[in-house]
Image: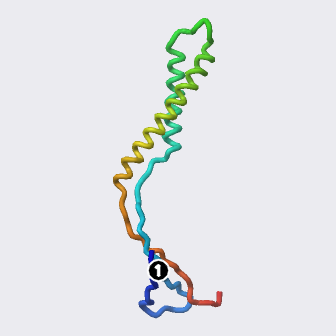
Amino acid sequence: MSETAAPDPAPHTPGEPVETVVAHETLTVRRSPRYMRFLALGAGVGIVAALILTLIFPENEDYDRGQVFGFLLLFLGAIGLGLGALVALIIDRRAARRAVTVVADRIDAHSSDNSQ
């Protein structure tokens, strides 16, 4: 990272901002998934699967439907959460291949008028 000052190309009026290039930086730009959305979607799919499985199978004489739903919710919710995280990681790895390297200039703008 080198710091260079650009010469003032034209005369300016007082109070007008003066822009100076402070630094050139090389950046990597890429898209990435929103992990919380994938985790929430995976947990939601697990909750819906637990509800469907609870209602499809006949009621057990040892456990009522609430207990069965709770057990299934615990396991399928965790599995859905894990699968959502796995899908997000796979998408993130694929997006990393499409990363682009760019050169960015950091510009410092200040006013040459000191009366403010």
Asked which secondary structure carries label 1, the reply is: loop
**Residue ID at (51%, 39%):** 39
**Residue ID at (52%, 34%):** 81
Residue 112 pos. (x, y %): 56, 89
Amino acid at circle 1:
Glu
**Residue ID at (53%, 16%):** 55
Closer-to-camera residue (80/57): 80
In the rendered image of this protein, does residue 76 appear above or below residue 33?
above
Figure coloring: rainbow
48 relative to 28 in the view: left or right: right
Q: Residue furthest left?
A: 98
24 relative to 15 in the view: left or right: left
Q: Residue furthest front?
A: 1
Residue 51 pos. (x, y %): 54, 22
Residue 13 pos. (x, y %): 51, 92
Look at mark 1 in the image and give the residue it sits on.
Answer: 3
Please identify the quarter of the rendering in which residue 1 is found: bottom left
**Residue ID at (45%, 38%):** 86
Query: How many numbered discs, if any?
Result: 1
115 relative to 29 in the view: left or right: right
Q: Residue furthest bottom?
A: 11
Label 1, residues with CA under 10 Å away: few <14, some 14-19, many ≥20: few
Q: Residue furthest right?
A: 116
Residue 76 pos. (x, y %): 52, 26
